[in-house]
Image: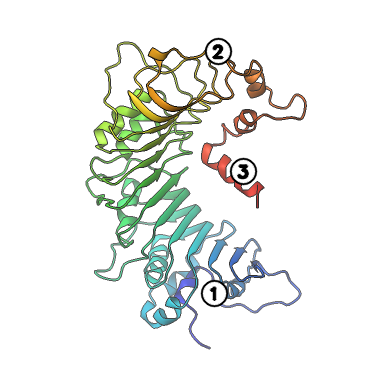
Amino acid sequence: MAPVPYLLLLLLPLLRVSADELEPCQLDDEDFRCVCNFTDPEPDWSSALQCMVAVEVEIRGGGRSLEQFLKKANSDPKQYVDMVRALRLRRLTVGAAQVPSQLLVAVLHVLGYSRLKELTLEDLEVTSLLPPPPVKDPGPALSTLRIHNVSWATGGAWLSKLQQWLKPGLRVLNIAQTHPLAFSCAQLRTFPTLTTLDLSDNPGLSERGLTTALCPHKFPALQDLALRNAGMETPSGVCAALAAAGVQLHRLDLSHNSLRAAASDDPRCVWPRTLNSLNLSFAGLEQVPKGLPPKLSVLDLSCNRLNRAPRPDELPEVSNLTLDGNPLLDPGALKHQEDPMPSGVVPACARSALTVGVSGTLALLQGARGYA
């Protein structure tokens, strides 16, 4: 039998397929998306073979340890190079498993020969320390990396270690519900092409943690920063963290945080001169916070608790101001947010308010699934 592609290292060895059982992997009619969920006590890993033709692959290990596959991690991936290069795979999700770090980097190594562009690691426990990368031929040339609910035995050095297994060129990095976020800045290399950083759904991050996570001068191309449901307290506190990091943002999302007005004696912060869009929606604001950027193209204050129209001296110079869902425009807005379904007709702010405690990003994902 021909050797199994190294890409499916997490999914094999081959087991005998029982024809009368429902396979754990399902491939759609267009051979575009393949989803595997290995929840059975004795899963049929060979079902994953059908995913070799798919563009999008999602693999979930049923929460089990994948240590049994460690013996395959030392195989020479070069024997599979031509086969891996021929795969259509562009987006891969791996989740719900305990993964030895040696196995994870072995898979990343072979993915370096693929055309993979988006990788999501979700609901994983990465055990043991990440080993150093090979001298040449590291992992894939990703454009997007998502890390959701992943714990790392490596500690604060996990991002710098993982970064070494990726080719340069990453543009989007999303880290949610992941610990720790206190990165080892001294070990972290610069992300020269990263334009979007999403640290939403880390409610314990806080402004102090943001200062630690935004390693100074490591994100020179950063334009978009999302901090939904990330424990932020004041826009001015976030501004101080941005100043310390030396980033020149274009867009900043602070929605779904419980924001408060800055104290009058707080030192005034200088916002990035490039910032043109600020989202402060769903933040429980009863007044416009002080110390906002002096000029913006977009300011979103929707779905807050503003009872009166902001005075001109309270606002920056702004081209597009959104105040929808505040009591000043909708007297019932607060009632909708606190008791969102009195009549079965749920306003937009109430629908999102239902998910504020979950997260901003997860709310968006749940909304997207509603249209699927």
Q: Nearer the viewer, residue 154 or 351?
A: 351
Distance from disc 3 to disc 2, alpha carbons, whole Å, reads 29 Å
Answer with mark 3 or mark 2, whichever residue precedes in sequence.
Answer: 2
Three-letter code, disc 1 = Met
Amino acid, disc 3: Gly
Q: What is the secondary structure assignment of the residue under circle 3?
A: helix
Q: Are marks 1 and 3 in contact (CB under 8 Å)?
A: no
Amino acid marked by disc 2: Asn
From the viewer's perspective, tell me whether residue 283 is left or right of residue 44.
left
Q: Residue at x 38, y 64 (%)?
A: 105
Quarter holding residue 294: top left
- How packed mark 1 is, by other alpha carbons closer than 10 Å (few <14, some 14-19, many 20 or more), is many
Which residue occupies the foreground of this view, 253 or 258?
253
Q: Which mark is residue 182?
A: none
Mark 3 vs mark 2: give the one in front: 2
Residue bearing the label numbered 1: 52
State which quadrant residue 344 falls in. top right
Does residue 281 appear left or right of residue 189 in this picture?
right
Residue at (77% x, 26% y) in the render: 343
116 w.r.t. 75: above or below: above
Q: Earlier in the sequence, mark 1 or mark 2?
A: 1
Give the SS element for disc 1: helix
- Evaluate if marks 1 and 2 touch, with contact meaning CB atoms under 8 Å apart: no
Give the mark nearer the N terminus: 1 vs 3.
1
- Which residue carries the number 2 mark? 307
> How many C-alpha atoms fall within 10 Å of the one at disc 2: few (<14), some, or many (≥20)?
some
Residue 223, image x, y percentages: 34, 42
Q: For marks 1 and 3, give the one nearer the viewer.
A: 3
